Image (tube, helix red, strand yellow):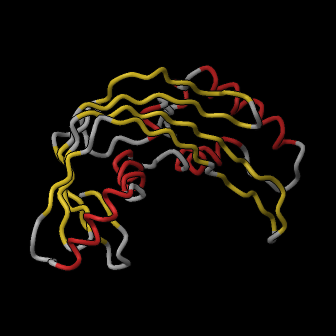
Amino acid sequence: MAESTTTLRQIFSIPADDDQNKSPDGWKTFQEALSKELKTIKGVVSISELASKIGGLFDIKLPDLLVGFWKKAEDLQSVLAESRRDPEEFRYLDLADHSITSEHHPYLDLKVRNASLKRIEFAIKLQFTLQGFVLQIQDGRITHVKTGQCEVGGTVEYEGLTILKREAAPIDLPESLTLSFSTSGRQEEE
């Protein structure tokens, strides 16, 4: 997982759509239960046809999550504001060793002719422990991240049942991440 594209799918070992035989037991149990439920609903595709869409809910890049968390911090907000006043100057912010806890609720709505039949919603709970990260800031944006040590753990729940669990463990991140911006102004990882 040394690539900067480490995703939640990789963290929780959710297999690629064409490799369902390597699924964790909880994921297999979820798919079997959902498949039985979908058989009772007319006009809905099978679980095998939904696999890529469900898996796609977990293709969230970890650096995107981290940048989103950091942008909410007061210290970073003031540095971002200062950098807008002098857009040519680079600023650096050493992040203290810190932990981040978050919860996300990705979902798919199954519909037939605009009628909602079923919502497949997950509760993803994550815990990050980070050490030695430094942000480079220019013109109100985080442009570069020097990474440090990162541990991540968490759970994935479906309808109140834990289907995937990862104990806190180190992950490999690239030494640094360069961030760019789309035309919409949304920050993206290169």
Q: Residue at x 58, y 30 (%)?
A: 155
- Tell me the quadrant of the picture where the C terminus can be found: bottom left
Q: Residue at x 32, y 79 (%)?
A: 183
Image position of 78 with respect to 173: above or below: below
- Tell me the quadrant of the picture where the N terminus can be found: top left
Residue 74 horizontal side relative to residue 109, left or right: left
User: Disc count in the image?
Assistant: 0
- x, y percent for residue 132: 21, 36
- x, y percent for residue 126: 51, 36
Residue 90 horizontal side relative to residue 141, left or right: left
- x, y percent for residue 23: 55, 26
Residue closer to the observer: 71 or 24:
71
Image position of 28 with respect to 56: above or below: above
Image position of 155 with respect to 101: above or below: above
Q: Name the residue at the left extreme.
A: 89
Q: Residue at x 56, y 24 (%)?
A: 165
Residue closer to the observer: 26 or 79:
79
Q: Quadrant of residue 144?
A: bottom left
Residue closer to the observer: 81 or 66:
81
Residue closer to the observer: 2 or 131:
131
- x, y percent for residue 181: 28, 70
Residue 91 horizontal side relative to residue 118, left or right: left
Q: Quadrant of residue 76?
A: bottom left
Q: Quadrant of residue 116?
A: bottom right
Q: Residue at x 81, y 64 (%)?
A: 112
